[in-house]
Image (cartoon, helix red, strand yellow):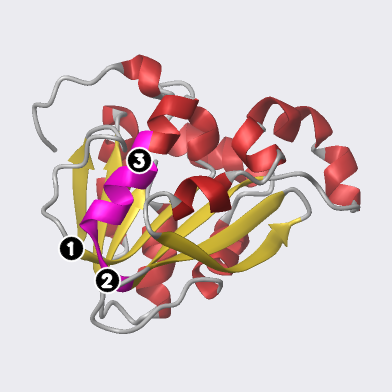
Amino acid sequence: MGGLEINHKKGNNFGWFFGGKHYDLFATMLGFGRTYYEQVAAALPLQKGMSVLDLGCGTESVGLAVSRRLENDVSIHGLDLSSTQLGYAFSKGARADISLNLYKGTMDMLPFADSSFDLVVTSVAFCETTSDVRKGAIREVSRILKDDSYFAIVDCAKPILGLDTVMMLPFFMFKETPESWNNHYPDICRESDLVLENEEYIKSYVKCQLFRKAD
């Protein structure tokens, strides 16, 4: 999990109290439990044998859900700047007998070769970073994706009407970004040859946007 020097201003370095098993507990209380991650996995263009990278992976709940859906026939890679999150992710993978490749780093400086991955996903992690990091991450994703492969941005978005919208109003208002609220990601991604192919709401305030890398 590397010795790269990390600038924690680029994201949320969850410590002991808010990270690890406590993070998963708080997330479940806020509606981001196992069912949510299964819904994320279901929205992704998955195929057995593929190589998947989760940016801002946290405790790697997305990767575990993807692995379960593909019956472990997948190579899961996760990157996060928090040692606490990565350590707990490793223990979760071990308990589930799922192999995880975990890296400490920031999503705008990826330690991977060009055209390395079949799918890159980020789930409610862009909202924890700055605009510069998000734009840098999109450029990096385009570099490491294989041609005709996919990038999924799952993030807080301008809400549609729903009971959970009212209940979670304080939460998602703090998590919104100009790019997600104003739906700027299609334009930003297009600059890096990533073309929007599909979008759907997973929650009334969380949208999955699927981009394909043009060949």
C-alpha separation, residue under disc 2 versus residue under disc 1:
7 Å
| SS label for mark 2 | strand
Do the residues bearing badges 2 and 3 touch, measured as CB atoms within 8 Å? no
Whichever of callouts 2 and 1 sits on the residue coming sooner in the sequence is: 1
Tell me the residue that label 1 is attached to.
115
Q: Does 93 sit above or below residue 126?
A: below
What amino acid type is highlighted by mark number 2? Asp
Whichever of callouts 3 and 1 sits on the residue coming sooner in the sequence is: 1
What amino acid type is highlighted by mark number 3? Ala
42 left or right, relative to 133: right
Query: What main secondary structure does the magenta stretch of the protein show?
Result: helix
Residue 68 seen anywhere in this rendered image of the structure = yes
What are the residue bounds of the magenta stretch? 136-148
**Quadrant of the image containing the N terminus:** top left
104 left or right, relative to 36: left
Residue 81 belongs to magenta span: no
C-alpha separation, residue under disc 3 versus residue under disc 1:
15 Å
Q: Does 23 sit above or below residue 67?
A: above
| SS label for mark 3 | helix
Which labelled disc corresponds to residue 147? 2
Tell me the residue that label 3 is attached to.
137
Do the residues bearing badges 2 and 1 touch, measured as CB atoms within 8 Å? yes
